[in-house]
Amino acid sequence: VHSRKRDLLDGIIGGTEETTTGVVRLRSMERAGELRYPVIAVNDSNTKYLFDNRYGTGQSTIDGILRATNILLAGSKFVVCGYGWCARGIAIRAKGMGAAVAVTEVDPLRALEAAMDGFLVMQLREAAPWGDLFVTSTGNTRVISRDHFAAMKDGAILCNAGHFDVEIDIAALEEMSTGRRLIRDEVEEFELGGGKRIYLLSRGRLINLSAAEGHPAMVMDMSFANQALAVEYLARNGTGLNNVVLPVPAEIDREIARLKLQSMGIRIDTLTDEQERYLASWEWGT
Amino acid sequence: VHSRKRDLLDGIIGGTEETTTGVVRLRSMERAGELRYPVIAVNDSNTKYLFDNRYGTGQSTIDGILRATNILLAGSKFVVCGYGWCARGIAIRAKGMGAAVAVTEVDPLRALEAAMDGFLVMQLREAAPWGDLFVTSTGNTRVISRDHFAAMKDGAILCNAGHFDVEIDIAALEEMSTGRRLIRDEVEEFELGGGKRIYLLSRGRLINLSAAEGHPAMVMDMSFANQALAVEYLARNGTGLNNVVLPVPAEIDREIARLKLQSMGIRIDTLTDEQERYLASWEWGT
Amino acid sequence: VHSRKRDLLDGIIGGTEETTTGVVRLRSMERAGELRYPVIAVNDSNTKYLFDNRYGTGQSTIDGILRATNILLAGSKFVVCGYGWCARGIAIRAKGMGAAVAVTEVDPLRALEAAMDGFLVMQLREAAPWGDLFVTSTGNTRVISRDHFAAMKDGAILCNAGHFDVEIDIAALEEMSTGRRLIRDEVEEFELGGGKRIYLLSRGRLINLSAAEGHPAMVMDMSFANQALAVEYLARNGTGLNNVVLPVPAEIDREIARLKLQSMGIRIDTLTDEQERYLASWEWGT
Amino acid sequence: VHSRKRDLLDGIIGGTEETTTGVVRLRSMERAGELRYPVIAVNDSNTKYLFDNRYGTGQSTIDGILRATNILLAGSKFVVCGYGWCARGIAIRAKGMGAAVAVTEVDPLRALEAAMDGFLVMQLREAAPWGDLFVTSTGNTRVISRDHFAAMKDGAILCNAGHFDVEIDIAALEEMSTGRRLIRDEVEEFELGGGKRIYLLSRGRLINLSAAEGHPAMVMDMSFANQALAVEYLARNGTGLNNVVLPVPAEIDREIARLKLQSMGIRIDTLTDEQERYLASWEWGT
């Protein structure tokens, strides 16, 4: 088997990776010495994660929730698990739609940013009985689990905009349920006894892909430009690279931003020669 | 002289730097081989620039403008030059106070973020005849200059929240003026002929320091914790360090975030063992 | 015919009206002496227009636009024609989704509110070459017409969330076009010569009804409660009422708000006896 | 005494009233038959309360709090008592400065609006142990009282932006305190035993007037235009008016909005003849 696998790798110069989760895993493989060819972390390009992850996931998650449920977001209590780039996009948009938003995190720095961005920050066990709607976007497993389901209100809605279908512990939810039925195309109702119902959207799979159309082309253009230019870069330089996770070269990143602005009809300023010199200097002061 | 300078350096283990501009300059010195001792870039610590620069400068700039002028921000056309961490703090708060906000930038990536954050993005020469109020926060020199003054409306107000007093070309403004007078403590009126007046706040020096009280203690606590712990780190490890600009160690950064959350009474979640393993894995998928 | 019409009215105690446009027209009929029975203006009930029109239309219009087009709202230039209750709901939500929003109005008071709410306010002929997307919500006819189409950018998108299909002058658009085709279910492309294309959504009919599912039940509950209780009121008091447009009684309005809060699990404060007396007094001061 | 009072009224044609509270009291006097001359409720003019009360009080209250305390609003838990026009201005601006905002109300309709505007809505006794800062703007007495003080956290800050100095029950706070001292010009610290301290700003008087400069001229211009034109109206029509509370005539209100827009350089659209006719019609439909 091993030799066959090696054969499959013949001629492979390298790869590119689009997602946060994928890059996390590739770095784990690199640390374990299991990476067999260089991979460019397209996800980590500024013109990718700052836009696709934030504005793309932010909008398409709201879109998915609305198509799945047609609930009113204004006045709802909206819990976002995570405050990475995808999660903060979701939190910002939920606030923009009139929800009261709480954020849960495991990272103190991100939690602090969420608080200073005006969001409620609390442990998920505090948020469980408070929230009307819960969206996971952490890249981790069993983020919402048994104890949280038990603490939730009748009518709570759950969905995932993170990765795979592991962020919500569906197996536990099924075990705790006395009955379940599909009440809309993407909405499954779980009865938990005592008249309490919990609604799971799209079986815990990515809500924006399952219930809506994924990200708009107007943001994926930048992600795919990174892919295309990263592949070109690999084709030109690949054989000289080590089997590590590499960043998208800064010139490519910057060029994509420049082209995107142009496509939006936005013109920006340029530094004068004097300003260029000033930025490189340390002699002037006051 | 040179030997005397060397004497002054005797016994210096290293330094720390608080500001974006300072770090830019120290890196220039490092590149030029002029850095005589290691310096820790406190500014670049997450618990510093993400908070002090953004939320601190954002609030204290608004505060300074209000104390200097008592103008109504709601309905005003507010131009922010720059979209670095300080500048975006200012832009967010101006929007939060009801202004229509335009951003000018020289960096395409930042310009793109500003646009997708919902701000108008334009060249300063387009913004000049549009804006009621202009705030510079770029770290550069002569950002607002002769041609911009000429294009501005009667009554335009200018101030700086970037660095020093060089961002607004005051010499040019004085040259163009037929008269000037102080009309409030921090407001100087320049007559430009034809009945047009431009108002310069605090002589172009930092508006938040000149007209208000600077940043709140509740955000400087993190910056100074970085300073104190960076100095302790230098004292313990300094003699073994090269004469370069160094980051604040990640453990210090993270610990400050943890302590700050605690002081705010915010509790966050912790990863389960299973979740720790999951994050480090690459075998599971779907 | 006239006598037959009278027959149809036999036994009618009164009516209720759900929409802003409908109430405007009924008042015109009342002024012209053409109103044959009393009508309760359900639309004008606080628990109707402040919620259904604002939060309902705001969300469902965004929803309709996303389903019709899957465009990215963040960074888009979004023009709302009108700043009535529906229109301001749309403007607020568009801003909340990251768009730069301009408002056009004919009423100076509303225009002033829009400006102080942080929106750009301009004439439609100024907005025409600026906007990426135009939404009408004025209740009037031919709001966007020939000259505006001519001034628009290639790629401009038009839709209506006001009433009927008259707010966009489709006949003029068709006349100006050299070709047209349906490119998505709810998106029609008009070629205007010189390579310029304009996209009309849902043939100018209500975008939230045509392309999405209309308002969420969670806001229509209040509107329909007004309808039901207004009908009950008519049944009880109708024969004693004149043939005029009447408001929903304040007690009904207030009771609906109280019930809605209860359904959302929100408890509020009550006035103490001392506070009731204080509000009715004028003797105390300072 | 009575005859002397009558003498004082000799030659008085009428009055005008600037504040919400004043109008409430004048209506009480009218109901009690105690109003001796006609009064125009300037406060209730659209160009007054929608702007002065909302955008004016909103900004100047934030300004007053910052000047009094220099606390960081980002990340703070900010409680607004009331959701009238002043209070909602404060809530919107606090949110715009990065605070998490809770609203308390006694009116179900306003409470519902606050919730759908994205604010937390709760009883004050729930908010008391949650908030970092409390602002009253209700027009009522003893809104924050003994039980609330007892439930508050160490370090809670209290201020008033409503009316007089009666909204916070200072007498009760003094009674409960073991000590007090002035720690900044407008900040008084009350010790409540067990190391708990509560901070009262400006002795509970209007924070925007005590600690800042009141509303900007750019919003008071509209209020004073209402005053001036209401006085002119009284001078012309006063002797024919009854001793009641009267609205500012709609033409005056509208004219002020028009002039204000003009002063801001904003041009708006005008209805075409066809559109005027359409608005008055009821024959066309679809």
Image: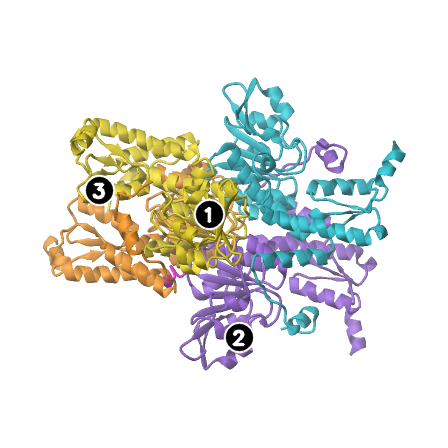
Chain colours: A orange, B yellow, C purple, D cyan
Which chain hosts label 2?
C
How far across and down, in percent of the image, does residue A231 sit? Answer: 21, 61
Asked if badge 2 and badge 1 are on a common chain, one would say: no
Who's the residue at 80% across and 46% down the image?
D14
Which chain's residue wears label 1? B
Q: Is residue B17 above or below residue A225?
A: above
| Cα gap from disc 3 to disc 2, whole angstroms | 59 Å
Q: Determine which residue is flagged by label 2.
A: C147
**Residue at image location 23% in from the left, 39% down from the top:** B245
Which of the image's four quarters has the N terminus of chain A? bottom left
Q: In terms of secondary structure, where does tag 2 sit?
A: helix
Q: Residue at x 54, y 78 (%)?
A: C172
**Farthest front residue in view:** B178
Q: Magenta stretch?
A: A210-218
Q: Amino acid at mark 2?
A: Asp
Q: Is residue A60 visible?
A: no
The disc numbered 3 marks a residue on which chain?
A: B
Please name the amino acid that badge 3 sits on: Met
